[in-house]
Amino acid sequence: MGFVKGLKCRECGKAYPKEPLHVCSYCFGPLEVDYDYDGIKKVLTRKLIESRGKTMWRYQELLPIDGEPTVGAQVGFTPLVKANNLARVLGVDELYIKNDSVNYPTFSFKDRVVSTALTKAKEFGFKTVGCATTGNLGNSVAAQAVQAGLESYIIMPADLEQGKIIGTLIYGVNVIKVKGNYDNVNKLCSEIADKYGWAIVNVNLRPYYGEGSKTYGYEIMEQLGWKTPKHIVVPMAGGSLITKIEKSIKEFAMLGLIDKADTKLHGAQASGSSPITTAVKLETDVIRPVKPNTIAQSIAIGNPADGFYSVKTINVSGGWAEDVTDDELVEGIKLLARTEGIFTETAGGVTVAVTRKLIEQGKLPRNESIVISITGNGLKTQEAVINKLEIPKIINPSLAEFVALIEEKKAAARR
Amino acid sequence: MPIKVRIPTPLRTVTKGADEVTVVGNTIKEIIDNLEANHNGIKERICDKDGQIRRFINFYLNDEDIRFIGNLNTPVKDGDQISIVPAIAGGVDCV
């Protein structure tokens, strides 16, 4: 069946059985899944992967489940778009958008981690699941828990964007709004997991949950024709995704599915919540927690769980990190929409704006291939742009008024 | 000045299974030293060899992360509630 041997501590290496555990009981280091890669190498080939359905489960040997996926069977294999229009504006030769704003079923990359975590939760026999969320994760846990027949508790900061709140409430699950920021919610969820024994996907199922993110990286490589790009720019909140993309590349290289693994990974944050980019720029691996203050709420995490490891990933790969202001991220959202027809949320605006900045700084050479990670959908964070768009003039259903309006627009364009 | 300290599952082996213990002290540092006096072996689990709280452990005083309010020197008073939470997140002093 599966290829998971157990869990092991990322810090001290102590081995643990396949259980819903997330911290080493001795050194408190994070636990990670330990795979039988020799076994995987014997069965997993490009041909086998290509013969399967276009979902993230085409890589299922590299995911931490023992049986078949039981939750989110349709998740993943989102488009990798060759972004020629945006490339022209940014002055680069080869640019791609990995577009998880159209992931199934809740329009963010979180659908990948949740289908993995809830399949695992069912294998463990949990009846109740939950999460600490900045929005997207809550949407996905709620939707997929309903599909899986599990009870769920979605615990979120009280001030999230309306699209994120409605996008959870609609599923009729238990929603708890907490006074405070995501870091406060995260701490509460650690205590809840401990007291109630529920499967909190990003707490006690975290070792399994995080593995789902690797499929984002596998898909980029397969969609490029079993090749790695030279650069990937990744938004960072807790910092997990960038480390899992790195892992996906290393695994594919180890299994002989790609030839070269020399991708530079670059991290993107909002300046109002930038503990990771700050550490990279100061050339330290010490993460100093901050109190987030940015409209990019989906990535507003002041005490990032994988901050330490994401700094390492960036440094080892030879990448860099940057952050952008709220105004710059709004421009990033508009730029992507107006060049590629993709409406992303605030985190995507951050990633586009950081890409632009890294190109201008020369950190992203103009003649090398670049992938921008778009992980969420703009319809969920309309507050960010609602006051930054032209308000259309209203006319009567009269051709004369329409003609006058068009003339006016032409004149304005000439000015 | 007894202060309540919530103990996470991995540390309950040193508190004989108790999920909450009471301890006295005027600062977080004193609390940790007094916890060690009552529950031998707990300090080396919480702190590294320099006496600093380990990267993967968070301490909260009345639900506020102590890194924002003075770290080990944070004053504590009667009736306060301390939580020790395996971090899922690492870091040191805040800015």
Image (tube, coloured by chain):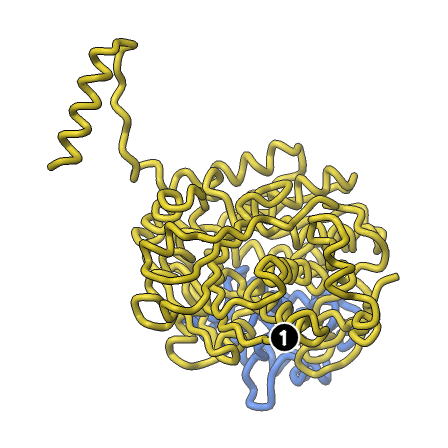
The residue at 56%/54% (across/down) is: A185
The residue at 51%/70% (across/down) is: B76
**Residue B23 percent coordinates (x, y):** 64, 73
Residue most extreme to the bottom: B49
The residue under label 1 is A259
> Along the horizontal axis of the image, is A381 left or right of A332?
right
Q: Is residue A73 visible?
A: yes
The residue at 36%/67% (across/down) is: A366
The quarter in which the C terminus of chain A is drawn is top left
Q: Nearer the viewer, residue B69 or A70?
A: A70
Is A371 rendered above or below residue A156?
A: below
**Residue A331 percent coordinates (x, y):** 32, 49
Q: Is residue A195 visible?
A: no
Q: Nearer the viewer, residue A315 or B19?
A: A315
User: Label 1 marks which chain's residue?
Assistant: A
- Which lettered chain is shown in yellow? A
- Crowd class of label 1 (few under 14; some 14 to 19; many from 20; radius 10 Å): few
Q: Quadrant of residue A217?
A: bottom right
- Which lettered chain is shown in blue? B
